[in-house]
Image (cartoon, rainbow, N blue to C red):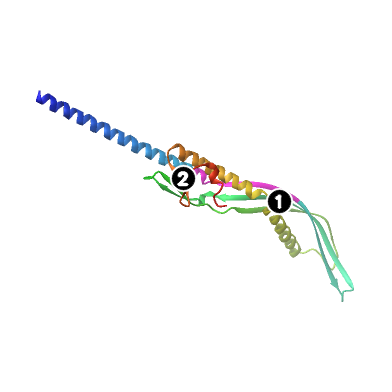
Amino acid sequence: MVRFIIGFLAAALLIGGIWFLSARNASKEELEANTSLIQQQIQQVGKLIVTEGYYSQVFTYKNSQKLFLNLISADKKALVVANTKATVEYDLRKLQTELDVENKTIRIISIPDPVLQIYPEFEYYDVTQDYLNPFEGKDYNTIKSQITSQIRAKIEASDLRKDARERLMAELANLFVLTKTLGWTLTYEEEIISSPEQLNLLNK
């Protein structure tokens, strides 16, 4: 009888040990799987986000020079059409994150600043010039510089940056949903992100 009891207890301890180790290994495997999935999501988010806008504007360039004691005026002018593609980019390869596997927490350390890029193309019409004041390379450089500055100021005042930010928040919202589903926590500057709406407050 004693042998039976001892055998029964030994078997129970053996089965309990096997169950404990199996549950522990399963939990560890699940944590590793979740960690791998989150890392893949962060890498996927780390793509370049680009918002594009297209602008077209007409400019008139004029230049006048007084010659021979201001007795003669030599003029030149051109009608310039500028077709411009503009992009606002977040290079999320520079998104700095920290993965705390032990506490199941993803920390967003910093979000890169948006970068505005403009690509103007110029078409020249109605170009007139005097013999004493012809168009030169520096004139075309001046035209490009002035028009590019004006277009940049116009785009800065538009909603292009806002649209790019909304796309950025959409990407980060995907990361939030994933972490929430897996029981992880997303934080930014030591603040826990508890809703996608809260993401809109980031870097404002």
Residue 126 placement (x, y as % from top left): 84, 55
Extreme residue toward the left, this view: 2
**From what the image shows, is residue 175 above or below residue 123?**
above
The numbered dot on residue 2 is none
Q: From the viewer's side, name the closer residue of 42 and 7.
A: 7
Extreme residue toward the top, this view: 1
Q: Quadrant of the N terminus?
A: top left
Residue depicted at x 73% and y 60%: 146
Residue depicted at x 61% and y 47%: 164
Residue depicted at x 69% and y 50%: 158
Question: Alpha-carbon distance for marks 1 and 2?
Answer: 39 Å
Dot 2 lies on which element? strand
Q: Is residue 59 left or right of residue 99?
A: right
**From what the image shows, is residue 82 above or below residue 15?**
below
Q: Mark 1 points at which residue?
A: 84
- The residue segment tinted magenta is 42-56
Extreme residue toward the bottom, this view: 69
Residue 13 placement (x, y as % from top left): 20, 31
Q: Is residue 19 left or right of residue 180?
A: left
Residue 50 placement (x, y as % from top left): 60, 47
Residue 144 placement (x, y as % from top left): 72, 59
Residue 175 drawn in magenta = no
Main secondary structure along the magenta-highlighted residues = strand
The numbered dot on residue 186 is 2
Dot 1 lies on which element? strand
Amino acid on which disc 1 is placed? Thr
Q: From the viewer's side, name the closer residue of 74 and 98.
A: 98
